[in-house]
Amino acid sequence: MQRDAAYLTKNEPARNTCRFQYRIVLIPSPRKAQSGTPETCSTMTDCRKIIHVDMDAFFASVEELDNPRLRGLPLIVGGDPDGRGVVAACSYAARTFGVHSAMPCARAKRLCPQAVFVRPRLDRYREVSNQIMLIFRSCTELVEPLSLDEAYLDVSRNHLGERSATRIAEYVRARIFRETGLTASAGVSCNKFLAKIASGTKKPDGLTVIPPEEAAGFVASLPVRKFFGVGSATERKMQAAGIHTGADLLRFSVEELIQLFGKHGRFFHGIARGIDLRPVLAHRERKSLGTETTLHRDILEMEAVEAVLLELATELGQDLTARAICGKTLTLKMRYQDFTTITRSCTDMAGFSGTDELLAQLPRLVAATEAGRRRIRLLGLSVSNLLPKNALPRIPKQLSLPFSGQKHDLTSALKGMG
């Protein structure tokens, strides 16, 4: 047996690494088949070594790092608790009260009246994130950031010359703690799906490994809500079909799952068997660009809607111009007073590359909503199907009336279509 794929699992003391104790479990390398090609890893068709690293309560931890007096307190990073802000992040002390990200700050305050609220400092978080990403890239070129505080690493080949993905994960977590003072949790397995699930298993400050031969059993016991790509709507649809766990998914053929879930059915069929062939992409292409705002008060008047949309369109248009990109699809997001959220989209092959193009199409998107009849608490704009600005064909554009030169009277247009 070649001992070239060592995985470590948390257990009783054996050796001290990165503030934890581990025992080593050796997984044999794939044997050579008669054809000279390696066999698959157990039931897997994927023998890569993937690490998913997720910082622990990142925004809140940075605030505690910069202000030690906050340590141990129920800390919430977000907006005004007496206003309309939402929770961007919170400490583990705050989570014990039921507080979580994306929750309205007012509700978080009701759940935890003693909580300390601080406003987000994105520039500071980006600064620390850059330090962490440099640590990742010192190990491998195949680093796929998912956000400021998490990333996938493919360490099948790595700069350290280390064969054990778990030892690399230990090394990465130790360096992050030494160089930033922050803790991270990591998951190690043979694909992205399993590695990400593993990283959340022993938070905070944990390391979990799913060896290839244990993948099928692990996935079989997993609730479907934990599966990548399964949101609340898909979970309800799965439950209606009698699918509650990975084991339930195994009862369905790929054709049946495609019939139930469209193109995602093939993916669900694979991950139910522990198979996820998605590569770690060092250069992920941005799929959309957008901006949104939660309003300080619910608005009903169309003049107020127009003012917010004009501000959002200006911000998004300037961002598109600065990046020299455009998008073929414009999407308006609207959340009503009762938290019902709707989107309305339109596609223009000539593309949206600046504020004027955005404003020209907004009236017909707004006309397809209940703006002016229902109070609104959130508005957002985004463009997708992105391309470099110079990659679009030259298509003459017909600007929507009314307009005066390049400045559109959005209020009149909205009233005219309401």
Image (tube, rainbow, N blue to C red):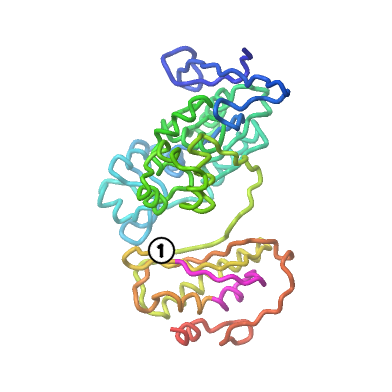
102 lies above or below 16: below
Residue 303 located left or right of residue 174: left
x and y percent of residue 401 in the render?
Answer: 57, 86
Quadrant in the picture for residue 3 = top right
Q: Secondary structure at mark 1?
A: strand
Quadrant in the picture for residue 36 = top right
Q: Residues within 10 Å of mark 1 (few under 14, many from 20)?
A: some
Residue 361 located left or right of residue 62: right
Labels in figure, total:
1
Q: Quadrant of the N terminus?
A: top right
194 lies above or below 1: below
Along the viewing direction, whichever of 340 and 126 lies nearer the viewer = 340
Q: What residue did someone put label 1 on?
A: 294
Along the viewing direction, whichever of 162 and 63 lies nearer the viewer = 162
Q: Is residue 353 magenta?
A: yes
The residue segment tinted magenta is 343-361
Q: Residue at x 56, y 38 (%)?
A: 276
Q: Is residue 67 magenta?
A: no
Along the viewing direction, whichever of 50 and 67 lies nearer the viewer = 50
Q: Residue at x 68, y 21 (%)?
A: 33
x and y percent of residue 20 in the render?
Answer: 45, 21
55 lies above or below 12: below
Residue 149 located left or right of residue 133: left
Q: Residue at x 33, y 61 (%)?
A: 83
The kind of residue tagged 1 is: Thr
x and y percent of residue 17 in the render?
Answer: 51, 19
Q: Quadrant of the C terminus?
A: bottom left
